[in-house]
Image (cartoon, helix red, strand yellow):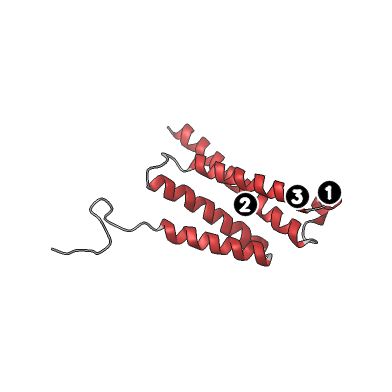
């Protein structure tokens, strides 16, 4: 009889999602706080996708796409709220992205949310048409 410590009979293998949640969170923090636009967007997408995956695997939701849509929407709302709260109204323009560190970081968060909504929406539509 071979026993694997830490694993139950219900779950024969360990889940990979916690590693991706931690990696996504770390990358998103580095990207947002240091100001690395691609790293911030990738880290937030990885974090949101991992949240959707872990909730699906654990049985809290049937499909990951609605969770992905929700996380994307939350990111957009948070980025918009911080923009209205912290950025002067005269500075909110597409031409100012890249010149001010705060606006650029908030745009990275919003872009990650838009990408997650696009991914969740396309996957949901493809899943419905395939069924």
x, y percent for residue 57: 38, 47
Front of the two marks 2 and 3: 3
Q: What element carries label 1?
A: helix
Q: How far apart are marks 2 and 1 (CA)?
A: 23 Å
x, y percent for residue 97: 78, 56
In what quadrant of the picture does the C terminus appear?
top left
Q: Are marks 2 and 3 in contact (CB under 8 Å)?
A: no
Q: In this view, does 129 lie to the left or right of 101?
A: left
Residue drawn at (66%, 48%) of the image: 78
Q: Is mark 3 on a helix, strand or loop?
A: helix
Q: Is residue 124 left or right of residue 99?
A: left
Front of the two marks 2 and 1: 1
Please tell me in which quadrant of the rendered image residue 16 appears. Answer: bottom left
Front-most of residues 94 and 73: 73
Task: Compare marks 2 and 3 and give the one earlier in the sequence.
Answer: 3
Label disc, if present, on residue 1 of the rendered structure: none
Q: What element carries label 2?
A: helix
Residue named by callout 2 = 112
Residue drawn at (53%, 45%) of the image: 68
Residue drawn at (51%, 43%) of the image: 67
Label disc, if present, on residue 85 of the rendered structure: 3
Residue named by callout 1 = 89
Q: How far apart are marks 1 and 3 (CA)?
A: 9 Å
């Amino acid at each position: 009889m071979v026993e694997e410590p830490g694993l139950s009979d219900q779950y024969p293998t360990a889940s990979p999602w916690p590693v991706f949640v931690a990696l996504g969170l770390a990358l998103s923090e580095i990207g947002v706080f240091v100001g690395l636009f691609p790293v911030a967007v990738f880290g937030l997408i990885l974090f949101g996708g991992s949240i959707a995956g872990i909730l699906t695997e654990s049985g809290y939701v049937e499909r990951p796409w609605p969770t992905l849509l929700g996380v994307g929407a939350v990111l957009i709302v948070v980025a918009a709220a911080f923009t209205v709260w912290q950025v002067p109204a005269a500075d909110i323009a597409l031409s100012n992205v890249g010149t001010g560190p705060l606006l650029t970081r908030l745009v990275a968060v919003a872009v990650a949310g838009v990408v997650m909504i696009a991914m969740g929406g396309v996957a949901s539509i493809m899943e419905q048409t395939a069924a």
